[in-house]
Amino acid sequence: MKYYTTKEISCILGVNVKTIQKLIREHKLEAFRISGRYLVEEKTLKEYINERKV
């Protein structure tokens, strides 16, 4: 299973890290926190991207 940091997701989506953090805070992107860092599962990120394409 692969996990992405907010920095990696910001590069993939082409947005600022703060935007990713906001999506997580607003529960629009599911993530969990380990050692003070947010991590997003690959499956969750793919689902988020696919929902945005519609």
Image: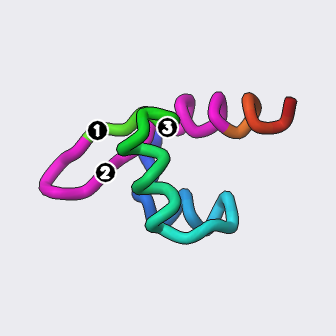
Using the image, determine if residue 13 lies above or below residue 23: below
Magenta-highlighted residues: 33-48
Neighbour class for label 3 at 10 Å: few (<14), some, many (≥20)? Answer: some
Image label count: 3
* Amino acid residing under circle 3: Leu
Quarter-of-image position of residue 31: top left
- Contact flag, marks 2 and 1 (Cβ < 8 Å): yes
Residue bearing mark 1 = 32
Q: Secondary structure at mark 3?
A: loop
Q: State the residue at coordinates (73%, 29%).
A: 51
Q: Alpha-carbon distance for marks 3 and 1?
A: 10 Å
* Amino acid residing under circle 1: Phe
Give residue 29's mark.
3
Q: Position of residue 30 (x, y in %)?
A: 43, 33
Give residue 38's mark.
2
Magenta stretch: residue 51 in it?
A: no
Using the image, determine if residue 39 lies above or below residue 11: above
Q: Tell me if residue 1 can be seen.
A: no
Task: Say whether residue 19 is left or right of residue 31.
Answer: right
- Contact flag, marks 3 and 1 (Cβ < 8 Å): no
| Of marks 2 and 3, the one in the foreground | 3
* Amino acid residing under circle 2: Tyr
Q: Alpha-carbon distance for marks 2 and 1?
A: 6 Å
Q: Quadrant of the C terminus?
A: top right
Neighbour class for label 1 at 10 Å: few (<14), some, many (≥20)? Answer: few
